[in-house]
Amino acid sequence: MANNASAEKIASILRTDKMVVLKMAEFMEKKFNKSLILDKIVAENNFKVKEILGILGLSMKSKAIDVHNAIISKLKKDDGRLFEILGQPDCEKVETCEKMNTLVLDISDHPKGFFIKKDKAKEVLYKNPPPNIISAFGYKDCDQLLENEDYREVFSALRFVESRDWMNN
C-alpha cells in the first residue's frame, strides 16, 4: 500500500486530493504488480530537486523567494554567457538573425543520443507485445494498441509499466 506521506507530497505537487493519488497508486500497484510506486516517485523528485538546488547554491531549506531569485540570476548569467559565445549578435540585423537561424538548424539537425526509427520501434513492440500496457488500455493485442496510441508514448511507459523480466527479455 502507498505511503501516506508520499501521497500527500505528490498531491501537493499536483494540487489534487490525496485520496485521488492514493487510489491511483493502489490501482497501479495491483495492475502492474509493483510496490512503493509513490515512494519511488518522491525519492526521485527529491533527488532531482536537491541536485538543481545544489547547482543554484541552495538547499532544501531555502525559501521560495531565494529559489526564484537564484533561478532568475542563473538565467541572466547563462543568457549573458551565451550572448558572448555567439559573438554578441545584433538581432536587429537580418543577416545576424539568418546566421543564428542557421546555427540553430545545424544544432537541431544533429541531435546526440540513442534513437530508434518508427518502423523499428513498432517491429520491436510486435515481436514483444507489452502485456501490462495492452491490458491497462483494455486492448486485445499490439495492433489495437498501436492503432490507438502513439508508439513513442508506449515506449516511454515501458520501463514504468512492464515487469523487469519483460524488459530484460
Image (cartoon, helix red, strand yellow):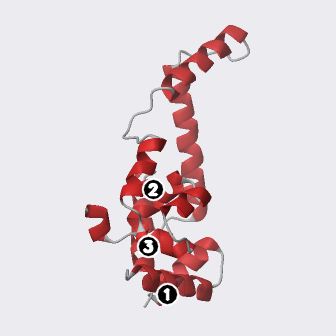
Q: Are marks 2 and 3 in contact (CB under 8 Å)?
A: no
Mark 2 nearby-residue class (10 Å; few <14, some 14–19, many ≥20): some
Secondary structure, mark 1, is helix
- Residue drawn at the location 41% of the way across and 49% of the way down: 123
State the separation of the CA atoms marked 1 and 2. 23 Å
Secondary structure, mark 3, is helix
Does residue 165 appear to the left or right of 154 in the view shown? Answer: left
- Residue drawn at the location 56% of the way across and 23% of the way down: 105
State the separation of the CA atoms marked 2 and 3. 13 Å
Mark 3 nearby-residue class (10 Å; few <14, some 14–19, many ≥20): some
Q: Position of residue 111 (x, y in %)?
A: 44, 32
Find disc 1 in the rendering and name its residue. Answer: 26
Of 97 and 59, nearer the camera is 97
Find disc 2 in the rendering and name its residue. Answer: 155
Depth check, mark 3 against mark 1: the one in front is 3
Nearer-N-terminus badge (1/2)? 1
| Disc number for residue 132 | 3
Mark 1 nearby-residue class (10 Å; few <14, some 14–19, many ≥20): some
Q: Position of residue 108 (x, y in %)?
A: 52, 29
Secondary structure, mark 2, is helix
Q: Position of residue 136 (x, y in %)?
A: 52, 75
37 to 122, vertically: above or below: below
Depth check, mark 2 against mark 3: the one in front is 3
Furthest toward the top, the residue is 95
Quadrant of the rendering where the C terminus is positioned: bottom left
